Image (spheres, rainbow, N blue to C red):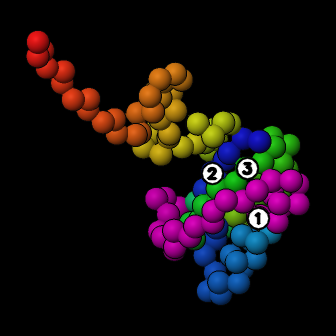
Amino acid sequence: MPFYQMVCITAHYAEYTNIKNLVMETAKHVMNRGGVVRKLKSWGTQPLPQRMRRHGNYYQIGDYWTMDFDASPRTLQSLNSALGKDPRVVRWTMLKQGVKVEDILHPRARTKLDSIPSQGANPMVQQRKKPALSNRG
């Protein structure tokens, strides 16, 4: 399953329960269809870069949050459809992070298995220096 990151802007409500319910519904939508939610993160309430219109309402302030998840393309389509119909959602986007684990890991987190020779000494073990042979004759 591909790994995605969703960035979502929701309408700002005085009560936090509306946004909490939306986040829970979105995560359950992914998990009920065989996906895995890896991380949820709130960016807080922020002014929007411009006035935005959605479902006949205008918004100047929004609550930003992200969700990192693994899901199939069909789950992604159904999630896009559900978010498009939800009046609490102002804007959202899905960013595909990768398909393989190697695509997702940062370069410093990758292992160095390719640099380890398949034969010979283990480079992780310090080798003892052999004493020099002297020519005594």
Residue 92 covered by magenta stretch: no
Residue count near mark 1 (Cα–Cα under 10 Å), binned few <14, some 14–19, many ≥20: many
Q: Residue at x 73, y 49 (%)?
A: 70
Q: Is the magenta stretch mostly helix, strand or loop?
A: strand
Q: Badges 1 and 3: C-beta atoms under 8 Å apart?
A: no
Residue count near mark 3 (Cα–Cα under 10 Å), binned few <14, some 14–19, many ≥20: many
Residue count near mark 2 (Cα–Cα under 10 Å), binned few <14, some 14–19, many ≥20: many
**Residue 53 can be seen, yes or no:** no
Q: In which quarter of the image is the N terminus?
A: top right
Magenta range is: 26-51
Q: Residue at x 67, y 59 (%)?
A: 38
Q: What element carries label 2?
A: strand
Query: Which of pointers 2 and 3 indicates the residue nearer the eye?
Result: 3
Residue labelled with disc 1: 27
Q: Which residue is drawn at 51% across and 74% down?
A: 45
Q: Is residue 79 left or right of residue 33?
A: left
Query: Against 47, is 103 above or below?
Result: above
Q: Quadrant of the C terminus?
A: top left
Q: Which residue type carries mark 1?
A: Ala
Q: Residue at x 66, y 47 (%)?
A: 4
Q: What element carries label 1?
A: helix
Q: Is mark 3 on a helix, strand or loop?
A: strand
Most distant residue in the left direction: 136
Q: How many labels does the image show?
A: 3
- Foreground residue among 124 and 84: 124
User: For residue 17, what is the image quadrant?
Assistant: bottom right
Residue 89, percent from left and from top: 70, 64
Residue labelled with disc 3: 70
Q: Which residue type carries mark 3?
A: Asp
Query: Against 26, is 79 above or below?
Result: above
Question: How much space separates mark 2 and mark 1, taking CA atoms?
Answer: 12 Å
Which numbered tag is attached to residue 5? 2
